[in-house]
Image (spheres, rainbow, N blue to C red):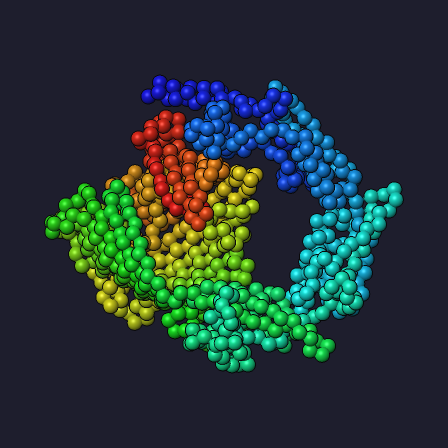
Amino acid sequence: MKVSRFLLLSALVWMFSACSSTKFVPEGAYLLDDVHIYTNQKKVKPSALSLYLRQTPNAKWFSLIKTQLYIYNLSGRDSTKWMNKMLRRIGDAPVIYSDVETERSRVEITKAVQNMGYMSAQVDAVRNVKGKKLKLSYWVNTGNPYIVRTLHYDIQDEKIKEYLRRDSVATLLSEGMLFDVNVLDKERQRITDYLHRNGYYRFNKEFITYTADTVRGTYQADLTMHLSPFRLRADDEPRPHPQYTIGEVSFITDYDASSTPAVTETGDSIHYKGYPIYYNGKLFLRPKVLTDNLRITPGQLYAEQNVQRTYANFGRLPVLKYTSLRFAERQQGDSAKLDVDVLLTKNKHQGISLEVEGTNSAGDLGAAVSVSYQNRNVFKGSESFLLKLRGAYEAVSGFQSSIGQDNYTEIGAETSINFPRFMFPFLTNNFRQRIRATTEFGLQYSYQLRPEFSRIVTSASWSYRWGSQSRRSQHRVDLLDINYLYMPYIDPDFKAKYLDNDQNYILKYNYEDRFILRTGYSFTYNSAGYAPVNNATVGNTYTVRFNIESAGNLLYGISNLFATPKNSNGEYTFLNIPYAQYIKGDLDFAKNYVIDGRNSLAFHVGGGIAVPYGNASVVPFEKRYFSGGANSVRGWSVRSLGPGSFAGSGNFLDQSGDIKLDFSLEYRTRLFWKFRGAVFVDAGNIWTIRNYDSQPGGQFRLDTFYKQIAVAYGVGLRLDLDFFILRFDGGMKAINPVYDSGKERYPIFNPKFGRDFAFHFAVGYPF
């Protein structure tokens, strides 16, 4: 085995050394091997200046190896052969050094530093040649920065001057500031946005200019901001900037930009609360739905934020495919008016979909199929109704049933109705408008038949969801979530062997009829918003997730209030069914650091705790924590790690806990085409709150838990298909908490592939 590894490593070293990185570099030319930027001012970061480089070296995988250049150089000289074509398509051609691009980069970097306020900055390009390779360095000497000595405003428009006076506390400009052109431009945009919120529909930042007079012999400048008067055309007479109020607002449904003539000419119309509504045939949305989602009010000043809120509100309605606002200017006396047409294009109201999926549960293969029906406009208010039927079959190994049932089958149905508004009594219209919540009611039924048992799970839910205007934060409130677990049949042999011997309380608890009545709240904040649909992050971003839920408190209070009798197990019941009682909280934080255009570093830490109390001594199976798998410690297969130092008994129910900790560090890189790579280190485990005989070593203790943290490392390959990501991860155990010491505890020093490796396939990033 060691000989084969040595031979493979030797072959790889020979391959990469044999294909010289300068193989395709012409005579008299140089391979651009490396580029660095150095500055003499700590405030001027080289990373910020790298954006202005016009020529960069060949990309490196994991910032270490120019793999794609080597792949390109594996190709032969004959470009007509298919193998050479493929290698060149996958690889990257060598970057040949260019004097022209170097000078362009030097000039661009110089301008960028000067714009930061260092007007006398100089940049030198230094070349270091070795053989046919060239290393390039840009040395930035910033010089002394220029400071704004005095600040003046030249604003003749009295109304705008008053607006800016009221908003002066938010200005980015001040005497003594660095003469930074970027800050000056940000102030132009800030003022423009502010005026857009106060009726100035036609205003743009080009109306704002600056002049700066430098003081001879010093590094100081006198800065003046100018506001140009309004001109619609170059030859118009200058005049004050017009401030617009909203005029007439109309709704045009069934809008189609390609249709001729327009709906307003051929369709029907009604008036609702003073708003004209034009439509063809039948109006597919109730008039109140249209006006409730409108944030533009006739007679009020034009405000850009109200335009965006109107777009957001109508964008939430699944019955609509597109929404557009069309503005028309008109003069009414001395007032400037904006008439608005709200153009609505409807979506398909109904649809049927079919899904087929493969399943793999601990090596048992199966398949599932589901059929869904959706109606996006049940009551003409864009209410979305969903009905889904599901069936699944899976071969089950390792257990023979006494009734001849040797496989797993499942039949299920779920239905939900979603209202795009906050449905709750006694709420004011102002509150409903400020929090554009979605209300959802759902019902689910599932019948599961396995060799060892049959189970029926029914549930009903009532929840709310809403997000912020920036789409960065999301809230969910589960006002009511009812679950009923019924076990009509348990195989006698399985019952006698595992449930009746009182050796595994957790297992027995989760094979009994159970009623769960819970409420919960979850919050998610993503600093980048939710635009990236494939989980790929842009820039330095972070995500925070928080969840808390509780169950059984209301029922427990009622049971105590009326002194209802307990069952033989010492539990209160509801309709003769024992109910669960617990509280559970989770907190996760993930951050992504961008190193360069091809590489990033992602970090994740998370934890959770679930505490049973009152009417329960165990948290229900569905609410317990598991460790190992594609989104946890990837050196272990799913649900095979912990709790604590417990080695497992072959039953995944035993490998569950009440406390969970997870840490991950992942270096991500872009490979070629749509492939991405990663190397990672994971750490974590689960623990129980109480000491259970069936889980020896699983209880959380402050003096031992840190010794029971498992560690894994590995590599991953991802296929980024834009709309989703396929992920393949291979993890190896590094520290195994099952063992106290020796080689078995530290497999990182003595790895065995068959013992320590776990492969994972998943969709999306792990965090």
Q: Position of residue 509 (x, y in %)?
A: 25, 54
Q: Foreground residue, 713 or 440?
A: 440
User: Where 271 sits versus 521, above or below?
Assistant: below
Q: Position of residue 665 (x, y in %)?
A: 47, 39
Q: How many marks?
A: 0
Q: Foreground residue, 80 or 72?
A: 80
| Residue at 42% over, 37% down | 716
| Residue at 68% over, 65% down | 202
| Residue at 49% over, 37% down | 669
Left or right: 43 with respect to 439? right
User: Where 533 sits versus 278, above or below?
Assistant: above
Q: Foreground residue, 99 or 665?
A: 99
- Looking at the rendered image, the quarter that the N terminus falls into is top left
| Residue at 62% over, 24% down | 29
User: Where 440 sits versus 108, above or below?
Assistant: below
Left or right: 302 with respect to 723? right
User: Where 283 sits versus 677, above or below?
Assistant: below
Q: Position of residue 688 (x, y in %)?
A: 34, 47
| Visible residue check, residue 647 | yes
Left or right: 405 with respect to 35? left
- Residue 56: which quarter of the image? top right
- Residue 51: which quarter of the image? top right
Q: Position of residue 354 (x, y in %)?
A: 31, 56
| Visible residue check, residue 654 | no
- Residue 130: which quarter of the image? top right
Outermost right residue = 216
